[in-house]
């Protein structure tokens, strides 16, 4: 997938300014696809030039005007064609997993603390996802065709975070049993 496809999907859901689109990446799409605001703005210009997007300048009240982008027929066709292509099996990269594998060659106490920190970060993200699910999808059985795909992605995020938390807890439990990896004391914690 390219950033282009994430932008096509987002604009298919709702027209947006570059600023609004960048905020969507910060709040939701960014959990699955990373992009800087600069990358988004550059690609919006390219996609407008290629005819996949159209922009309308909206006058601001007391603010400068803003460009609001929407898909064109060419953009809809590009999105349709992309959904027909098989998705390659994703190969996740994890600096965290490599660090755990190398903990015996470095500072095991620091790595253990990193496992605890990762667990807490994933607990926070899970809490966010669960709150989003409760607020936006209180009755998943009643979802219409338009709301089902975003819900399915949110469920994927919930399951991923749940699995990550369980993995961190399993690692900590196993490390607790191993005398070579003692639980850090308060003085050892940064």
Image (tube, rainbow, N blue to C red):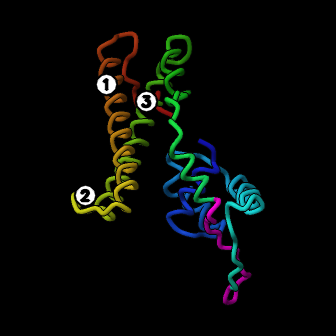
**Which numbered marker is on residue 115?**
3
For disc 2, the marked residue is: 140
Q: Residue at x 60, y 67 (%)?
A: 20
Q: How packed is label 3: few (under 14 Cα within 10 Å), some, or many (20 or more)?
A: many
Q: Nearer the viewer, mark 1 or mark 2?
A: 2
Up/down of 189 relative to 67, above or below: above
Q: Residue at x 21, y 58 (%)?
A: 141
Up/down of 6 relative to 96, above or below: below
Dot 2 or dot 3: first in sequence order is 3
For disc 1, the marked residue is: 170
Up/down of 180 relative to 152, above or below: above
Left or right: residue 74 versus residue 174 is right
Q: Quadrant of residue 2?
A: top right
Q: Quadrant of residue 145?
A: bottom left
Left or right: residue 127 versus residue 84 is left
Q: Residue at x 53, y 15 (%)?
A: 102
Residue 66 magenta-highlighted:
yes
Image spot of residue 104 (x, y percent): 50, 11
Image spot of residue 150 (x, y percent): 40, 55
Magenta region, residue range: 60-74
Dot 1 or dot 3: first in sequence order is 3
Q: Secondary structure at mark 1?
A: helix
**Residue at mark 1 to residue at mark 3: CA–CA distance:** 10 Å
13, 82: nearer the viewer: 82
Up/down of 48 relative to 103, above or below: below
Left or right: residue 28 versus residue 150 is right
Q: How packed is label 2: few (under 14 Cα within 10 Å), some, or many (20 or more)?
A: some
Q: Are marks 1 and 3 in contact (CB under 8 Å)?
A: no
**Which numbered marker is on residue 69?**
none
Dot 1 or dot 2: first in sequence order is 2
Image spot of residue 156 (x, y percent): 37, 43
């Amino acid at each position: 997938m390219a950033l282009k496809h994430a932008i096509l999907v987002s604009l298919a859901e709702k027209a947006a300014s570059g600023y609004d689109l960048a905020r969507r990446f910060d709040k939701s799409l960014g959990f699955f696809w990373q992009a800087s605001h600069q990358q988004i703005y550059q690609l919006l210009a390219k996609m407008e030039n290629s005819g996949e997007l159209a922009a309308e300048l909206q006058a601001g009240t007391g603010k400068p005007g803003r460009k609001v982008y929407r898909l064109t027929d060419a953009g809809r066709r590009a999105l349709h064609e992309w959904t027909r292509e098989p998705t390659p099996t994703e190969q996740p990269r994890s600096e965290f997993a490599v660090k755990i594998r190398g903990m015996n060659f470095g500072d095991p106490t620091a790595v253990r603390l990193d496992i605890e920190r990762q667990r807490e970060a994933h607990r926070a993200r899970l809490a966010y996802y669960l709150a989003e699910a409760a607020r936006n999808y209180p009755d998943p059985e009643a979802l219409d065709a338009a709301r089902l795909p975003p819900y399915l992605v949110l469920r994927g995020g919930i399951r991923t975070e749940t699995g990550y938390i369980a993995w961190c807890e399993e690692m900590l439990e196993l490390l607790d049993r191993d005398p070579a990896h003692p639980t850090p004391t308060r003085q050892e914690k940064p």
